[in-house]
Image (cartoon, grey):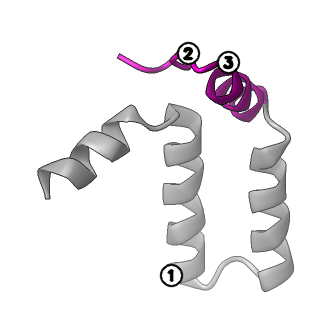
Amino acid sequence: MERHLDLALAAAPGAIAAAKQLLRNVAEGTISHLEAVAALADRWESAETRHGIEAFFSKTKPPWAP
């Protein structure tokens, strides 16, 4: 359990917020499948994602990492 918490706390804050919102929308039935796919694709085009990918390939920590 602690390992899962550590992984979540190390994740990009914008990605966590977007995932939580997407889950809320899916649970409430306020989002279509197409809108859910679009929301996920939008996250891949964010600056936060770009920074995370750059950090991964340069073997450095992303800006949000402790």
Dot 1 or dot 2, earlier in sequence: 1
x and y percentages locating residue 64 in the rendered image: 49, 19
Residue 27's mark?
Answer: 1
Q: Which residues are magenta?
A: 47-66
Q: Which residue occupies 77% across, 59% down?
A: 39
Residue 58's mark?
Answer: 3
Residue 46's mark?
Answer: none
Neighbourhood count class around disc 1 (C-alpha, 10 Å): few under 14, some 14–19, many 20 upward? few
Neighbourhood count class around disc 2 (C-alpha, 10 Å): few under 14, some 14–19, many 20 upward? few
x and y percentages locating residue 51 in the rendered image: 70, 23
Dominant SS type (magenta): helix
Left or right of 43 in this view: 8: left
- Front-most of residues 20 and 8: 8
- CA distance for labels 1 and 2: 36 Å
Dot 3 or dot 1, earlier in sequence: 1
x and y percentages locating residue 28 in the rendered image: 53, 81
